[in-house]
Amino acid sequence: MLAVHFPGFRVTGSDFADDRIRIDICVDSNSARCPDCGGTSTSVHSSYTRRLRDLPILGKPVEITASVRRFRCMVSDCHRVTFVESLDWLARRYAQRTERVTAVLRALVMLLSSILGATLAFSLGIRTSSSTLLRTVDRSAPTVKAPRFVGVDDFAIRRGRTYGTLLCDLETGRPVDIIPGRAAGPVAEWLSRHSGIQVVVRDRATAYAQAASYAVPEAIQVADRFHLVRNVADAFREVVDGKRWVAPTIPAEPVAETCTKKPEHERPTKRELARLASAQRLQHRYEDVPDRFRHGESIRAISRATGLSRATVRKYLRGTQPQQRAPRPPVPGKITPFADYMQLRWKAGCHNAAQLFREIGALGYDGSPSQVRAFVQPWRALAGTSVVRRASWKDVRWAILCPPERRNPIQQELAAESLDINPELREAHDLFQRFRAILRERRPENLPRWIEQASVSSFPSFRRLAKTFTADLKAVMAGVEHEWSTGKVEGQITRVKLLKRIGYGRSSFDLLRARILAAPCGRGTCPASVLARALRVEA
Ligand SMILES: [Zn+2]
């Protein structure tokens, strides 16, 4: 028998079996209140037993048997004859498990797929099935307070086939609803159902623009900055890829000049670095010992702290320098026997590594050509011989498409040279960078001039873009001016993708919506903390 007092009910008995625990309870009161008239009654009509599954104790399933009484309503003008005393604090009407269990199951199905949820519930001592878990989800459409600043973006439910629209409150960063499809109609319907919307941030798709103009004409529409940059970047890429441009020439050799790595002969090898580190460690310990001694530590304590033997500690205190290990002699490689021959040929004017490889191959060398190239590399650098060749267009393209502030020195040079020899490419590049500057400095007043320049440029992609920007001018200007962006929506879309995959593609739209809207980031309200609280896990 549990000798604990619970407010509101009494434990009348208990039974500890091997496979389950049963606890008998009854309501600790002589009277009950009629749900219709509110009158108190003490006249018991009858009673029955209600069985409820509760959270497990010591890993064993718990069954609560509640003795429930039916009372007569004593109020003469109440139409109700009898009523049952309330167990609302424990379980809902007709429920077969307590509200605590339901909360755990609901949290599980919000976090995991129903099958995984059922598996985890089983190991927590709650027997349930995946379909029971799915039934605990409240799929009714949520009633949300209309946000003042809404972010709208689409996401793929099945890529290329079905899409959904995610609406976020940009002030809280939380999703407020999802709508099937990405057409203007349903979005407009949602927007007009929620009053007080002041700003709609969206991508450049016309559907959301139409929806916002139709449903909330007074709201400011903002074209998202990221989408704006991407539009212009796409136009520029079309120019770059639309024609064969002249690639700049670069010194062909030494290779070191085309990459940021230091030449082979200057760069310390892994072994050298390890040797250096070990020598530094040794020196540090050598200096540490007298330091500790001066601060009053005993030789024994120093030995314990540094891991050196007491004899070594004494030696260091006498001032004997630690011995440095001699570097290992170089291991003769496959190429070593041919070094003299190659040197002769190099001096004779053969600076072609491939030719040298063929020649020493005939003499019996069975190593790789890259070893030969690496071997002659220091000679090449010394001689300063360099042959001019064209830069690879792939490298040049990367350099040009890379934002100038993120180019490395080699890319800077490549980009500068290729723009010098291709004036048309420079025009497009400047157009792109000018747009980025307008966005960065938040100067919407410079936008019309930019659009005009783009519309008279010789690039069809920019001319097309100028047209669409003109058609959506207000929103594009607002995008340049305001700091609102769909960044928070994109963040939520990442979460949506995760939730979608958790459902293994079986998740229906309303289940997906329930999962998405299940308080994603509020402290104490997300499914994970609900679960932890229900299970009394401190987290
Ligand atoms: Zn009554």
Image (cartoon, helix red, strand yellow):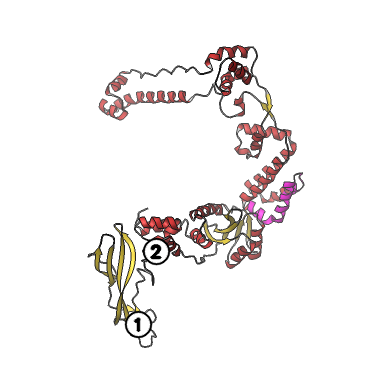
Amino acid beneath label 2? Thr
Residue 293 lies in quadrant: top left
In the image, residue 472 lies in the stretch drawn in magenta? yes
Residue 457 lies in quadrant: top right
Q: CA distance from mark 2 to mark 1?
A: 29 Å
* Secondary structure mostly taken by the magenta-highlighted segment of the chain: helix
SS type, badge 2:
helix
At a point 35% along the width and 74% down the height, the residue shown is 86
What residue did someone put label 1 on?
Answer: 82
User: Between 86 and 196, which is closer to the camera in this rendering?
Assistant: 86
User: Between 121 and 215, which is closer to the camera in this rendering?
Assistant: 121
Which quadrant holds the N terminus? Answer: bottom left
SS type, badge 1:
strand
Q: Which tag, 2 or 1, sits closer to the chain's start?
A: 1
At a point 55% along the width and 57% down the height, the residue shown is 170
In the image, residue 86 lies in the stretch drawn in magenta? no
Q: Position of residue 266 (x, y in %)?
A: 54, 22
Please tell me whether residue 373 is drawn above or below residue 138 in the rendered image. Answer: above
- The segment highlighted magenta reads 451-480
Residue 107 lies in quadrant: bottom left
